[in-house]
């Protein structure tokens, strides 16, 4: 993630945005953010408190359940909005947003500015409309079909501390499979360099598999 504070680039981005009037109604400092493909924009452990409008590029938003199964919630492109929930201090526990290609957004920090934003009726109308559209999309979405092999990787990447799986039997129970199935998959992943065996029953996701697995 790279923040850009160049005023000429910010003004140019505002002028090209379909939300130009909305952005001009704000009194907060705006800046640009650039993300590389595969970089996480939102995750449970990230407390950036950024309200962002996508200028270019694409992103994917998905929900990871505790057993590693994945729900694809949305794909975002130009003018997609991120960060509305932060305005209301709603904790993100399982939702992730990831850049699927190089992504640029125009953003501002919402933390400690909530009351000011609440008073901006035009902005709050916009936020409400965006949240309603996302709710409609969410209600129509279906669980993405994922194999056990895919769920093992997503479980290690998103649910294991330091991306390190500990305990074959315990993990197999959470992934709804047998210990033998899980061990077979881990052995295969170790052979192909996707995981590294630390000790008996303990595996770490290799650096080569840190990008998107979806």
Image (cartoon, grey):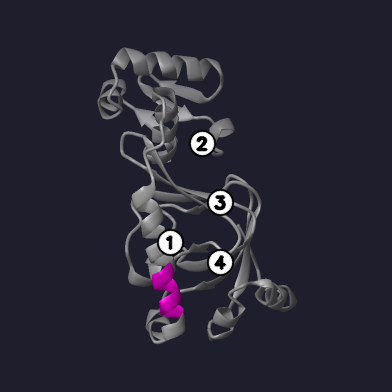
Height in image: 152 above or below 65? above
Mark 1 vs 3, N-terminal side: 1
* Left-right relation of 64 to 107: left
Q: Which residue is mark 3?
A: 59
Would residue 139 be counted in the magenta stretch? no
Residue indicated by mark 1: 47
Q: Residues within 10 Å of mark 1 (few under 14, many from 20)?
A: few
Q: Residues within 10 Å of mark 3 (few under 14, many from 20)?
A: many
- The mark nearer the N terminus, 4 or 3, is 4
In magenta, the rendered stretch is 123-129
Q: On residue 53, which mark appears? A: 4
C-alpha gap between disc 2 and disc 1: 24 Å
Element marked by disc 4: strand
Residue with the mark numbered 2: 214
Q: Nearer the viewer, mark 2 or mark 1?
A: 2
- Which element carries disc 2, helix, strand or loop? loop
């Amino acid at each position: 993630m790279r923040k850009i504070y160049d005023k000429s680039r910010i003004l140019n981005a505002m002028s090209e945005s379909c939300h130009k009037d909305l952005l001009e109604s704000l009194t907060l400092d705006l800046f640009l953010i650039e993300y590389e493909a595969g970089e996480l924009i939102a995750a449970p452990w990230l407390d950036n408190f950024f309200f962002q409008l996508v200028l270019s590029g694409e992103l994917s938003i998905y929900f990871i359940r505790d057993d590693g199964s994945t729900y694809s919630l949305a794909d975002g492109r130009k003018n997609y909005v991120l960060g509305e929930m932060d305005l209301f201090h709603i904790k993100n526990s399982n939702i992730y947003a990831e850049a699927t290609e190089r992504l640029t957004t125009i953003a501002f920090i919402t933390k400690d500015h909530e009351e000011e934003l609440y008073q901006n009726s035009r902005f709050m109308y916009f936020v409400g409309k965006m949240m309603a559209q996302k709710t409609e999309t969410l209600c129509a979405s279906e669980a993405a079909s994922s194999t056990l092999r895919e769920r093992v990787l997503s479980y290690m990447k998103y649910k294991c501390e330091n991306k390190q799986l500990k305990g074959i039997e315990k993990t197999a129970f959470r992934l709804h499979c047998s210990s033998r199935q899980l061990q077979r998959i881990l052995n295969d992943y170790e052979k192909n360099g996707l995981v590294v065996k630390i000790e008996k029953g303990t595996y770490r996701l290799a650096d080569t598999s840190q990008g998107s697995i979806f």
